[in-house]
Amino acid sequence: DIERGRFWYGGEPYLDFTRIGVNRAVTLSGTDRLRFGATWEDLDEVDGIDSEALTLRTGWDHIFGRAGMLSLGLRTRAVEADGFDKAYDADAATIAWRFAETGMEISLDYEERFYEESFYTFGTRVDVRRELRIEMPLPAVEVYGFSPVLNVERSTTESNVTRFETHST
């Protein structure tokens, strides 16, 4: 995949991005699959703070017959950037269950970010994010061949710098 685009914030251009990614799935059996992926990103912010990121992903999917599918995933991300509180290394794990009959998926994501420099502390800033997400497809509702998916999520970020703590639903 190759993507090039622009994000806007409040009506003004915020950043331009270039993203290049590769993904590969390897089928091990009728019930097991491994997934691998890598993504490189270049972000050019309007205010002049640029960053580059490399993300590596791996995962395993196992189908439990008519019950559903279990997915486990790991990812690591390294971001290089100018300025405080921009560059970080992150490690994350995800577990998800997709119900076969309804297509509903429940997932839990855990991520730790380690920032090299922070304007707000003398040491390394560490953020821990937890996210619970439920996705429910609504196949009975269809508009021009598209069916909506209802998403509900709860996300919490804890940090050794309270300014960066968040709770959202």
Image: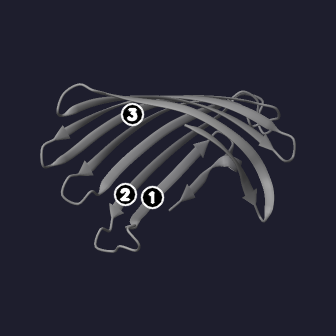
Q: Which residue is mark 1?
A: 153
Q: Which residue is mark 3?
A: 73
Which colour scheme appears in the figure?
one colour
Report, in whole angstroms, how far the alpha carbon at label 1 lies from the one at label 3: 18 Å
Residue at (75, 45) in percent of width and height: 16
Residue 83's disc is none
Q: Left or right: 60 with respect to 11? A: left
Circle 1/circle 2 CB separation < 8 Å: yes
**Tag 2, which secondary structure?**
strand
In space, the residues marked 1 and 2 are separated at their CA atoms by 6 Å
- Please say if the residues under marks 3 and 2 sit with CB atoms less than 8 Å apart: no
Q: Residue 82: which quarter of the image?
A: top right
Circle 3 packing at 10 Å, graded few (<14), some (14-19), many (20+), is some
Q: Residues within 10 Å of mark 2 (few under 14, many from 20)?
A: some
Give the percent coordinates (x, y) of residue 144: 41, 72
Location of the N terminus (image quadrant): top right
**Badge 1 or badge 3: first in the primary sequence:** 3
* Foreground residue among 161 and 19: 19
Depth check, mark 1 against mark 3: the one in front is 3
Using the rendered view, name the quadrant where residue 21 is placed: top right
Vertical comparison of 138 with 46: above or below: below
Residue 39 sits above or below residue 162 on the image? above
Q: Earlier in the sequence, mark 3 or mark 2?
A: 3
- Residue 134: give its label: 2
- Camera-nearest residue between 108 and 20: 20
Q: Give the image location of residue 51, x and y in percent.
A: 75, 34
Task: Look at 65% across and 31% down and name the residue there.
Answer: 53
The image position of residue 132, as x and y in percent, is 41, 52
Residue type at the position of mark 2: Ile
Mark 1 belongs to which amino acid? Glu
Q: Position of residue 158 (x, y in %)?
A: 57, 45
